[in-house]
Amino acid sequence: MNYSIALVPGDGIGPEVTSKAVDVLKFTGGKFGHIFNFVELEAGGCAIDATGEPLPDSTLEAARRSDALLLGAVGGPKWETQPGHLRPERALLGLRAGLGVFANLRPATLLPQLREACPLKEEVLRASHPEGKPTFDILIVRELTGGIYFGERGREGDEKSPDSSAFDTERYSRAEIERVLLTAYDAAAKRRGKLCLVDKANVLESSRFWREICAEIAAAHKNIETSYMYVDNCAMQLVRAPGQFDVIVTSNIFGDILSDEASVLSGSIGMLASASIGAKEAGRKYPPGMYEPIHGSAPDIAGKDLANPLAAILSAAMMLRYSFSLEREALAIEAAVNSALDSGLRTTDIAGRAKDSGEKIVGTNEMATAVMKALENA
């Protein structure tokens, strides 16, 4: 099979980690008889430098023609003084909206090899795990194209006046909420059958709307254990007892914050992949999908062979699973990542704190090479 993949390396370490993900995809394609064709596109800060805008029309058009999109990272201090509509991050919002991806899937799992990199005590982890194990396995499903990030915004009054103000509007339609909730329930049915809606229904009318719709959908999914939690309590519970969660579903802004919190518990933000998926459209062979590591562009380590490529590689595995239904190939990449970690290889961000651990600190290139060697031997 031939697959067309739009590649947006972006800024900072983005080009380094995406190049390693591409290497792994090509190797996997050769092993399993697939051809992955890549078209490289500009978005983010590099696009601002080249074209004056974070998301050129040509990039979005080419991305729409592709079967899926793999993104590295965008942004950096160089562009922090840009006005809001010209910030590199606007490229992410534009790609998500333009591709029609509305549900962001962010796994947060503590791998046994990275136990020493998790800041939580072992007794804390064991206490909340259903089997008393020192780990957790959470999937955060974040609504991606609605809410306060896409709502009406503006400023009023004289900028220097004490009465001047700024506003951002949280607005959700029933259709936006239903489709992401259904995605989350589908994911829970394939996992441990638990779903927690996180909101702020004691204060926000939009959150109360989420709860009403969730209660309707829950009634049709009685095989799923549905619960509700305020976002401030959830932020605390992720640190206090992460093992209690299976699938967390929430709004755009809450999901943005909670998924980054969960990433720290997993040992490093450099380990976590994400998938942004949408509904299949007429004329498309595959549903739209956008895949990216959740880490930032880290310009301070760019070009130094220090970046952890595993989140980008695991994002590529998620692409194979969710866009192309290549489950065997996705599992092979994930097993190869585990094999590299089992061998004791660590980039600096996931190095444990235990003495005499037998770990070997490696760079971007060596870690990616180890993954491909494990794939070859699988």
Image (cartoon, rainbow, N blue to C red):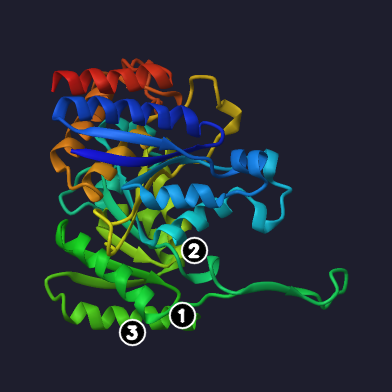
Residue 167 seen: no
Amino acid type at circle 1 is Ser
Amino acid type at circle 3 is Glu
* Residue closest to the eye, 97 or 231: 97
Disc 2, disc 1: CB below 8 Å?
no
> What element does badge 2 sit on?
helix
Residue holding disc 1: 206
Residue 307 location (% of width, % of height):
47, 27
Residue at point 45% right, 24% down?
348
Separation of marks 2 and 3 at Cα, in angstroms? 19 Å
Name the image quarter holding the C terminus. Answer: top left
As drawn, is 304 to the left or to the right of 229? right
> What element does badge 3 sit on?
helix
Residue 212 numbered tag:
3
Residue 346 seen: yes
Q: Earlier in the sequence, mark 2 or mark 3?
A: 3
As drawn, is 153 to the left or to the right of 38? right
Residue holding disc 2: 253
Separation of marks 3 and 1 at Cα, in angstroms? 10 Å
Dot 3: few (<14), some (14–19), or many (≥20) neighbours within 10 Å? few
Query: In the image, is residue 205 above or below residue 378?
Result: below
Separation of marks 2 and 1 at Cα, in angstroms? 12 Å
